[in-house]
Amino acid sequence: MSSLSPSFQRVLSCSAMALSLLASIALTGAAQAQTRGGTLSAIVQPEPPMLVSAMNSQAPTQYVAGKIYQGLLTYGPDLKPRPELAKSWTISPDGLTYTFELQSGVTWHDGKPFTAADAEFTIGKLLPEVHVRTRTVLNKYVASVRAINPTRLEIKLKEPFPPFIMMFETGTMPMMPKHLYEGSDYRKNPANQTPIGTGPFMFKEWKKGAYIKLVRNPHYWKKDLPYLDELVFNVIPDSASRAVAFERGDVQVLRGGDVDNVDVKRLRAIAGVDYTTKGWELFSPMAYLVLNQRKPPFDNVKIRQAVMHALNRNLIINNIFFGQGKPATGPFVSSTLFYDKNTPAFEFNLKKARELVKESGVDVARYPVKILSTSYGANWDRLDEYIRQMLEGIGLKVSIESSDAGSWSGRVSNWDFDMTVTYAYQYGDPALGVERLYLGSNIVKGSPFANVQGYSNPKADALWASAGATLDPAERQRAYSEVQKLLTSEVANVNLIEMEFPTLYRANVKNLVTTAIGLNESFDTVYIDKK
């Protein structure tokens, strides 16, 4: 083509602006050299099962791993791409070829150089095997990945996939060291115990049940960064003790979910404490109840519809999450692309719920069910108890069984549950964050964030396919509107609330939230003001 499409021109313009931003960051680093040093103490809740985000996508893993590993890109609050390990990028006018120019002089924590060969290996081989969320897209759309030279990477797609440019942040596509993983069993590789990345902080120590310690990377590729000497992620099982640790100054950062929501207002009022809900723009988390549809009683759609009517979402927000969130009306968060406000929602109606149970013909008393609890804290424990009470009120026999993060992930990943509450990120586009939870082809074991409930509808699969492939936003909207109505009516999941995660931190902690991935960022420009 003799001229570039408007979308391609915008990508080039974005690359140019990103380069300018990178330069300004470098200047800022020089100007604030006096802020170097110090230890930032935070909390990781619950304790993650591992620190390799290529193989585990749970929120605690992404939080810590984001300081060790990096992606080719990150994203601004406006969801526009910014450079990370890639300094610039272009997309061909036909949407099939993505070319990345990589940063030079980048090394892994063990001193080996990071090159396009690592990116080729990561995107072409490792992630398509082990990253259950990312591999769905890579295996479906990627035709080839090629290192043209040490600093240039080319990715060719089989067909256009507009959301692809949103996939290059550290939690979705973390770059992995080829020299440590090639030819190995990725999941059993010893490097998983001592992670090696390109990020500003290096793994030092993990004392199980106590803390995870990262230290400054002295050979970090961004000049004069990072500012901090050390990051400590404390493991404190009790919510009240976590709140006390923040009050005393033992920890300086509280991530959403670190403390009971009832404590947020009090902690926010402490002198010298700042508060923000920014940094979740890419994620747009949705809390939902997963019902295992492979067996009674939840294989019956009327029972699932009864569950929807039996839960009061406004009560959940106001009484359990203390006003932090808004009711979910369907599978798409209302702030995300292609949300359809006209999707018919389920009202809270116990009478209707009981009628649906009767209409189903299912003797629900014959099928006692268990809620497999998460280990996210007191808010989630109260939610489990509320769900138990309400479902017993429409005739189900319900109990609760506890689990930790590792066992919960293992059981849900292997479909060994009746029902469980969790939340998932939507990643800026339904083809990236929502589709994975409902595709028939993603009824796979190995991740709790696949179609673990076993929902299967060829019509829905066809709608996902057509919406993900077209370049026409209007066509995407039509398909996504239809799929929202279908998933909601069939209760493919029990969507509960659009979550709001507050971050509380000491006011002398600077540059904490600067992008759309918030606290999952690298923290390379975070510093502690010592004035």
Image: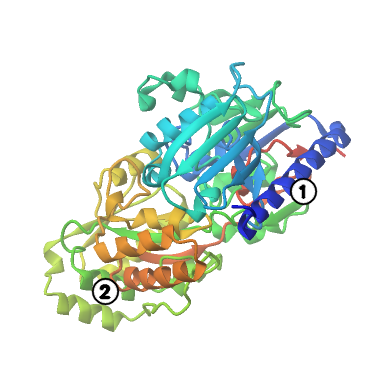
Residue 421 shows in this picture: no
Residue 465: quarter of image: bottom left
Rendered location of residue 181, percent (x, y): 44, 22
Name which residue type carries label 1: Ala
In the rendered image, the residue lying farthest to the front is 2
Give the residue displayed 21% in from the left and 67% down from the top: 396
Rendered location of residue 244, percent (x, y): 62, 46
Q: Quadrant of the C terminus?
A: top right
Find disc 2 in the rendering and name its residue.
306
In the rendered image, the residue lying farthest to the top is 111
Residue 381: quarter of image: bottom left
With 377 as the anchor, is 23 left or right in this view? right
Please say if 515 is above or below 114.
below
Give the residue displayed 86% in from the left and 36% down from the top: 32
Find disc 1 in the rendering and name its residue.
507
With 318 as the anchor, is 522 left or right in this view? right
Rendered location of residue 291, percent (x, y): 28, 59
Disc 1 to disc 2, how far (Cα)?
47 Å
Badge 2, how many Cα within 10 Å: few under 14, some, many 20+?
many
Rendered location of residue 195, percent (x, y): 51, 25
Q: Considering only order in the chain, which callout, 2 or 1, is on the residue closer to the N terminus? A: 2
Give the structural element (helix, strand or loop) at label 2: helix
Name which residue type carries label 2: Ala
